Image: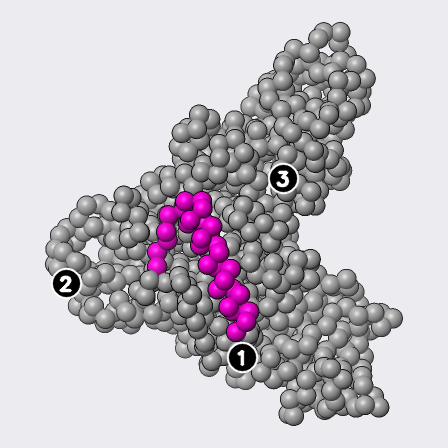
Amino acid sequence: MRNQLLVSAAMGLAVYGFAGVAYAAPHHEHGHKQDDGTGIAGTVTEAEPEFRHQFELEAGQIVTLTTQSEENFDTVLTLLGAGGKPITQNDDADPTTLQSLILFVAPESGTYSASVTGYGGTTGSFELHIEEGIDFGLSDAAVIYTEGAVSLTNRQRTHDYQLTLAEGDILVASTEALTEGLDTTLVLLDGSGDIIALNDDRGDGSLNSQITHLIEASGDYTVRAGSFSGSDTGELFFSVATDPNAELPFDFTSIEGESIAVDEDRIDDSHPVYRRPITIAEGQTLYAYVDRVDGDLDPVLRLLGPDGMPVAMNDDRGDGSLNSAFAYTAPASGEYIVEVDRYGGGPTSGGFSLNLSWVPASVLEVLQALRESIVTLSGDPQSFRTEDFVVNYTLDGEDSTSLAYAQSVGDALQHALEEQLGRMGWREPVRDADGLYRAFVADAGGSMGVTYPVETVFDNPHTADIREPLASRTVFVVENDFEGFDEKEAPVDSLMRATATHEFAHVVQFGYDSEEGLDWLYESTASWIETVTVGHHQDATDYVETDYQRPELCWTTSEGGFDYSQWTLLQSLADVHGERVVVRIWENAVEHDGFDTMSVTLDEVGTDIPAALRRWRAQNFAMAYELAPLFDRPVALHRSLNSAESWTSKFGPQQLGANYIELDLDGRHEISLSGNDTLELVALGHRDGRVDVIELGQGGVVDPQAYDYLGLMVFNPVVPDAPGECSAGMYTLDINETRQAASQSVSYSFDAPHFTAPTPVSQAAQ
């Protein structure tokens, strides 16, 4: 998935053509209105080619501006700020109606103006609607309890809303992130504090959340908004409503069959896995679903075959909860095992209920159809085939595109396949029943593209020599027009080709392992693939800045964007061991998981994680990459030291992270490190287009006069206990003048024609 977020306008946050918002006609009975609900009548004529309407906004207020025209007048809507300065503009929010839409967050209180003109000088009449809030697709019968912007802060990492609901109410709770990169979550709790519904991503390709839940018992409830990491901060729009016309998700408990058993148990640290043996006869179809009873358990449901390998598995069944369900028809009689554990072996825990029954084989088709429909087009679906892909598209609605553009996507995908499978030697991923890969050209909901696993086949049929335990078939989306990506300077064709390459890399990955514990691998590999297959069309260099600005954070940090930006680690490995080493990582992911996946691969080439990461952090300093001229910045400078002194850093590097320090000293100096025995010192000297790497350990003598620029890298070689489990501590550097000669020799060097000295970070970041 290539996450791209809201467009940051010069005077605030403006969004247009953003699929995360349900663009039905505004429901004027909801929320506060700037108009009276009937709209502000306007006309554009040859004599008066522009219509303007002024309105007042308060700082932080969120408004949706739309045009409506019975004659389908093709409007262009522009939002103007103080002094008539344009902030943002939209032509067609929905090409079928030619009307316009802008979502805007006011950065400051004041007078704003909406300007309406006709596209291409056309004229006509319309209504302008200015309404507070965001349309989440609620019906006219909905009752809104609360809606508005809320903040997640370091002191308040969640936002709660309490309400009383009646049996039979349909609750609809929604979030829309207003801060770039914020991955929102929603939780519904009953009066006892037990979780009865959760949602992370609502399934439209965005990181926003929505819960649609039928209330089974009258009482008090709490809707809690938060972030996926539990620590992210930022602004989000939060809505809680009841809507009798809301479409409820599929009821997995409604599938009828011959009951076998209902087991209740608990998953926690002392009992992380529940197993139940069951005998299945050839041709019998087992239906299993698990519901969390209490706690925050995120259950995963598996069926192990007679050989102990998984034959069926589900994590989230797609009803807005974290519960699981599967159906399986046995090809042969035998002893199977139903297994319940927790997602990723994580810290969640709680009670659960496991329901088992015999059902008709047709239930498999029902469940698979639900999964296959994860992507739906807004208009009449069209499709065509290339040699290896079926490309689905539409000419109508928010997903609309042209046949020519869709065909160019097909061409880009064929090129991606030929490069990745043919030239680079990646294994062929799982195809559909027609022997094709399914692609959609559609609005990707604020992302450039997104890939969904839709069928876990476990053993990839195209790898006869490997028995994969978790290979999956996918469908994927490539953005239809790249509107709203103003921060991207590349033309649409380049963005499309980079995205097609990136998403097909995910298709390939799922053919190896659809549940790799080293989650960093997915986005970093797909981003790296861009750089080695599509030339100047690649988009991955735009992401490097995220890591270069925060090199002190650990490798595998859970903070947003780093999985994309740290593709340079794969390039660093490829520079030493060849491109094949990246393929080997994924081949090892079949049998290994988490850090073991990387450790086994690096052991094959005679190194380990700390050594590889130390070299990578040094290479980042040297900017020793062919694509470095496209990087937005060098690594961040943690501190500049220009005299013999003792200096303490309150915030050292996290595991496998680095601080970069400038040594602006005259003459030789002895440097020693104390306060943290796990840290290491590495001197980095630049001269004559090269960067020398001198490994000092806990200390040594350096001679800054020998280099044009001498830096010191404080590196943390400790591997975290698990990906994303990161921490940092203090350390002290003691610097003293000395007449001793340099005590360590150069360990290795980089050709560094693109070297740029590290640039400072703010005092607050040190």
Predominant secondary structure, magenta span:
helix
> How packed is label 3: few (under 14 Cα within 10 Å), some, or many (20 or more)?
few
Along the line of sight, which residue is nearer the eye, 264 or 478? 478
The residue closer to the viewer here, 182 or 510, is 510
Q: Which mark is residue 396?
A: 1
Q: Give the residue displayed 69% in from the left and 67% down from the top.
A: 14
Mark drawn on residue 558: none
Spatial CA distance of label 2 from label 1 is: 44 Å
Inspect the image, locate mark 1, and give the three-letter code of the amino acid beneath it.
Asp
Q: What's the residue type where badge 3 is placed?
A: Glu
Q: In the picture shown, does residue 624 fall above or below 251? A: above
Q: Nearer the viewer, mark 1 or mark 3?
A: 3
Residue 626 disc label: 3
Judge left or right: residue 470 versus residue 102: left
Q: Secondary structure at mark 2?
A: loop
**Disc 1 from disc 3: Cα separation:** 42 Å
Q: Is residue 93 above or below residue 636?
A: below
In the image, is 292 to the left or to the right of 530?
left
Look at the image and say whether residue 450 sits in the magenta stretch.
no
Look at mark 2 in the image and give the residue it sits on. 283
| Residue found at the far right of this picture | 83
Identity of the amino acid at label 2? Gly
Residue 120 makes an appearance in the image: yes
- Residue range in magenta is 403-431
From the viewer's perspective, tell me whether residue 582 is left or right of residue 548: left
Where does the image place residue 281, in percent across and percent down from the top left?
A: 12, 58
Q: Residue at x 66, y 86 (%)?
A: 68
Quadrant in which the C terminus appears: top right
